[in-house]
Image: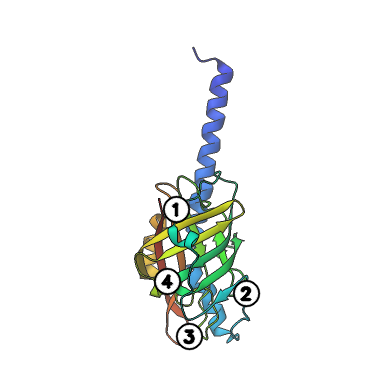
Amino acid sequence: MTTEPDLVTVRREARARRRARARVRAAIGAVVGVVGVACVAWAIMGAPAPATAPSSASVTPTPQVTTPTEAAGGIVALPKGRARPRLVVIPALGVKAPVEPMPVIDGVLTPPSPATTVGWWDRSARPGSSRGTVVVAGHKVQAGGGAFDTLGTLNPGDRATLRTTRGRVHYVVKRVVTYDRATLAQKSKSIFRQGGRPRLILITCEDWDGQAYRSNTVVYATPVS
């Protein structure tokens, strides 16, 4: 028979779970379309292409050769909720960019500066988690120099690696899609979902019209098993 203290505990835990789900839903709503807004700021201000940080962040126009370990793939077993991404490596694009936590501030999710650094949404899943979406966003700079300038040229089968404090998690690209702002908003729940099978979302701006970016490129990738 369930005792009264047990019922109190169950109800308290249920309320805590509901509040946690509500916070995640609110955060998902806050990030809809804001990656595009952040990228627009770089282009409108006419900022020169940021200098590439030595060794820690390099964006080159030609693919780099990966090491045998990276090419072999394989998901690294990481304790859920403990390791966050430190570096994103995309061999097909020659991208090797540091990753910083990216909170929602005043309703906006903005990739960090300099533009050669990308952001990991700090309410999304962590690499190696058994469920949820790891969300990584980066700048696209019209004049060049952004970490994700060529993200839209990825193809299914290309690889991406997230290096963490506790190991590496390798992903394979499944889809590369460009959404206009309205479509991105409609699909936000599925794009930024934190349930379901583990996956990686890479996102940046697209479709520069001379004044602003009108769309977002979204790359869907799954862990290599």
Callout 4 amino acid: Asn
Note whether residue 105 is visible. no
Callout 2 amino acid: Pro
Residue found farthest to the front:
68
Q: Nearer the viewer, residue 87 or 21?
A: 87
Q: Label 1 near label 3: C-beta < 8 Å?
A: no
Disc 1 target residue: 74
Q: How many residues crowd mark 4 within 10 Å: few (<14), some (14–19), many (20+)?
A: many
Which quadrant would residue 59 be assigned to in this image? bottom right
Q: How many residues crowd mark 3 within 10 Å: few (<14), some (14–19), many (20+)?
A: few
Q: How many residues crowd mark 2 within 10 Å: few (<14), some (14–19), many (20+)?
A: some
Q: Nearer the viewer, mark 2 or mark 1?
A: 1
Q: Position of residue 198 (x, y in %)?
A: 43, 50
Q: Say which element carries label 3.
A: loop
Q: Is residue 19 above or below residue 113?
A: above
Disc 3 target residue: 211
Q: How many residues crowd mark 1 within 10 Å: few (<14), some (14–19), many (20+)?
A: some
Of labels 2 and 1, earlier in sequence is 1
Disc 4 target residue: 216
Of labels 2 and 3, earlier in sequence is 2
Q: Position of residue 10 (x, y in %)?
A: 53, 26
- Specify the label residue 114 is tagged with: 2
Q: CA distance from mark 3 to mark 4?
A: 15 Å
Q: CA distance from mark 2 to mark 1?
A: 30 Å
Q: CA distance from mark 1 to mark 4?
A: 29 Å
Q: Nearer the viewer, mark 1 or mark 4?
A: 1
Callout 1 amino acid: Gly
Q: Say which element carries label 4.
A: strand
Q: Label 1 near label 2: C-beta < 8 Å?
A: no
Q: Is residue 76 above or below residue 30?
A: above
